Amino acid sequence: MAAPTRRLCITCRVMMERQTSLLTAQQILNPIKRHCTKGSQGEASGSNAIVRYFRSIKWTPLPLSVGFALIAALGYKHASRRTKKEIQAENSMKAQEWQVNLYRKMPLKFVSRLWGKVNSFDLPVFMRTPMYKFYSWSFNCNLEEAAIQDLKHYKNLSEFFRRKLKPEVRPIDQSHSITSPADGRILHFGKVENSIVEQVKGVTYSLQGFLGPPTWMTSQGTETAESAPHTNNPTISDVEYHKKLLKNPENELYHCIIYLAPGDYHRFHSPASWCVRYRRHFPGELLSVNPGVARWIQGLFNFNERAVYYGDWENGFFSLTAVGATNVGSIHINFDRDLATNCGCQWPEGTYFDKAFETGIDVRKGENFGEFNLGSTIVLIFEAPKNFNFKIQGGQKIRFGQPMGCYRTSENTTESENL
């Protein structure tokens, strides 16, 4: 009995020692716990109150229709806020009146005349090939398309800018009545609404301010020298002006703007077979016409120097306008040798000079019409049936001779691409 008794005593002793060590640990930790809980007691009570509040709320499911209505309202509110921001951003991008006036005060016409003289200086033969290759590399020109590929043939930069192309590299689409008049980029196109035209998306100009009064309609067609200067002072509403341009009230007016960059082919051609009856020259400014400036200045094309050619084609009114730009004060028209641009004279805003052509000048589609000394802009305004559809896209790169649209003829019930 001695051995079991001894084991029991040892076991009780170990248990008493463990209990004593446990009490000792609790005695040490309790003050620390009390000290810590004093600081966090306020935060715990606050969070507990929030939890108790949300637990007390009785959640009731909304009807499905109310849920959809709420989502639609929130979506509309978000969209309207976004639209307002976009409108504010677009308005902030447009030039203020003082900015346009300041820009117009810059000596851009003088700089353009100076640039024209520099371009006309004959280069030494040894400099021509490296100079023209560097220009071609800078502006991505395809020299393989040039009719004359010997770069030493071009005496100066002006000749190189206006180089001819091989006929086979720009085939004229004969199945369409209208083709692109030049190599370039489509800035904007579409239907003309009440004589207001978009030069780029959201930025407009007045057709009456661009073309001037429709006095060419009353001209007798006798060929004369350039007339005395006139001033473009609109006397009729834009709606009336729009109606006057249409020879067939069942038709619509359409427009297309093609921007020629410095690296593009600088000649332009007739986009259709038509008869040119009248020319109007506006000796205006030479502001830049690149897409960035076109988005910045409202009515840009109405400020710039331009040569407007009016006439008619198979569907009624037709016009082609060559717009000048910075460093592009020189506009040459093959059949109009009297046209002189960027002469250095100062004329009041809106001044223009007219010239009528006897019996009209017939030009064929694809025929060489004129040329710029550098890149610029061509604006087409034409009358066509209401079922006319463009086959181009905004910002698209287009080449001279490519088709631009189509409409259904009255003779066929199926669609036939005539434009």
Image (cartoon, grey):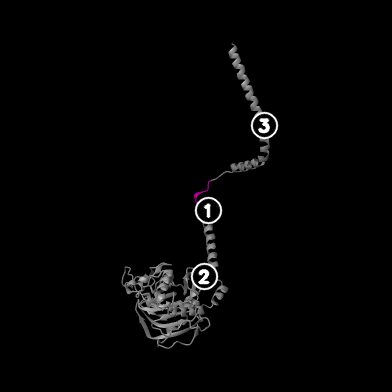
Of the pair 46 and 373, the residue shown nearer to us: 373
Q: Position of residue 258 (x, y in %)?
A: 42, 72
Mark 3 or 1: the one toward you: 3
**Residue 249 visible at all:** no
> Residue beneath label 3, please?
28
Q: Position of residue 183 (x, y in %)?
A: 39, 72
Count the marks.
3
> Residue beneath label 1, please?
70
Q: Position of residue 44 (x, y in %)?
A: 64, 40
Q: Amino acid at mark 3?
A: Ile
Main SS class of the magenta portion in the image: helix
- Residue 357 placement: quadrant: bottom left
Q: Residues within 10 Å of mark 3 (few under 14, many from 20)?
A: few
Q: Amino acid at mark 1?
A: Leu
Question: Which numbered tag is attached to residue 343?
Answer: none
* Cα–Cα span, label 2 and label 3: 78 Å
- Residue 123 placement: quadrant: bottom left
* Cα–Cα span, label 2 and label 1: 39 Å
> Residue beneath label 2, please?
296
Q: Residues within 10 Å of mark 2 (few under 14, many from 20)?
A: some
Q: Residue at x 41, y 83 (%)?
A: 278
Q: Quadrant of the N terminus?
A: top right
Element assignment for label 1: helix
Q: Position of residue 212 (x, y in %)?
A: 47, 80
Question: Which span of residues is magenta-colored?
Answer: 61-68
Specify which label sits upstream in the sequence, 2 or 1: 1
